[in-house]
Amino acid sequence: MKSLLRLAALAFALALAGAAWAQSGDLQEISRLLKQGQHAQALDRVNALLVTNPRDAQGRFLKGLILTEQNKIPEAIEVFTRLSQDYPELPEPYNNLAVLYAAQGQYEKARQSLETSIRTHPSYATAYENLGDVYTKLASQAYDKALQFDTSNTAAQTKLSLIRDLLTTTGRAPRPGSRSEPPRVALAAANSAKSGAISQKPATPPAAESKAAAAQRSGTPPPPETKSPPPAAKAPPKTAEKQAGSAAKDAPEEIIKAVRGWAAAWSKKDADAYLSHYAKDFKTPKGEPRGDWEALRRQRISAAKTIEVSIASPKVTMIDNNNASVTFRQSYRSDSLKAMSTKTLTLVRTNGKWLIRQEQVGS
């Protein structure tokens, strides 16, 4: 089973230990071994460290991550549980406990751990996102149970289908047994650097065919050559580089405007306007034919009495001048369902309009 939840990263130890972390050669070496996938060696080193300092919080946190990477879930749970008992002010151990509980299908325990993490650190965004995913899984289980007792319950069927849509993602979400994802900021910076390298290579237009060459090819004598006016007399044309630069500068604002327009059309239950925001080559979530996907979207939009969709904290990453992605928090509310999720849209500029080519739900 895939886990939608996110493990707390190693960066936690920096906030915990400050300068002392940077001075610890042992911890740095253990961290390096972990990142390189040398889990057995990392575990040996951290166990040796904890023999001399059994209460070392950074070392114990690293041991929990190593055991998680080795898929030794019960042992990892024990490490993070004891760490949370000894250092109840730290939110990360509670968050990682929730990820491990969710991997075992213990969503109620995961919910409790995440709520404790949030009480410890009310601005811990990762815990809030994970809590939203846990609530979604709990709701899915409840609707499934309702349908076991009443298979004709169309309202429960619709709600369950909507929730499964929210959980569907075209990319693989991180799971407790895999290496933690890099920080979002680092990914965004890398993408920005990549797009910058691309944008600095404008296409060179092909050289125009000379009049003499055209005349020779057609068999007619070339017209008499006329002198061109002095270069100073010509107004400097607007170069392709300036046009591209201007478009790139305005693109993020245009993309966010397009996404808000998409959400507004969805909220108004205007299926035609909503579907007009999708590109012709849109990749449907499950690979189904475009016509079947559109028919299902129309049915679900019309089935709801009211829909309210809002987006928050949109972050645009330019891939090149005509391709981009935007990640945001989506709030969906209808008469039958309330849900929060993180969504990433991949967009392409077609005839001056930004259209959705792909949707991803989750981290």
Image (spheres, grey):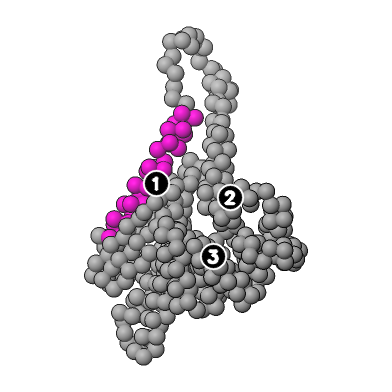
Please name whichever residue, 231 or 329, is drawn nearer the observer in this view of the structure: 329
Q: Along the horizontal axis of the image, is 256 left or right of 62?
A: left
The residue beneath circle 3 is 87
Which residue position holds label 2? 18
> Magenta stretch containing residue 244, yes or no?
yes
| Bounds of the magenta segment | 241-267
Return the disc, 3 or 1, that comes first in the chain's sequence.
3
Q: Residue at x 44, y 73 (%)?
A: 111
Badge 2 density bin: few <14, some 14–19, many ≥20, Cα 10 Å: few
Q: Is residue 201 magenta?
A: no
- What residue appears at the point 75 percent right and 64 percent down from the top-left corner? 48
Q: Is residue 313 above or below residue 175?
A: above
Please report the residue visible at 49 percent of the width from the left and 44 percent of the height from the top: 318
- Where is residue 141 shown, x and y percent of the image? 42, 80
Helix or strand or loop: what does disc 1 sit on? helix
Q: Is residue 347 visible?
A: no
**In the visual, does 81 lie left or right of 158?**
right
- Label 2's element? loop
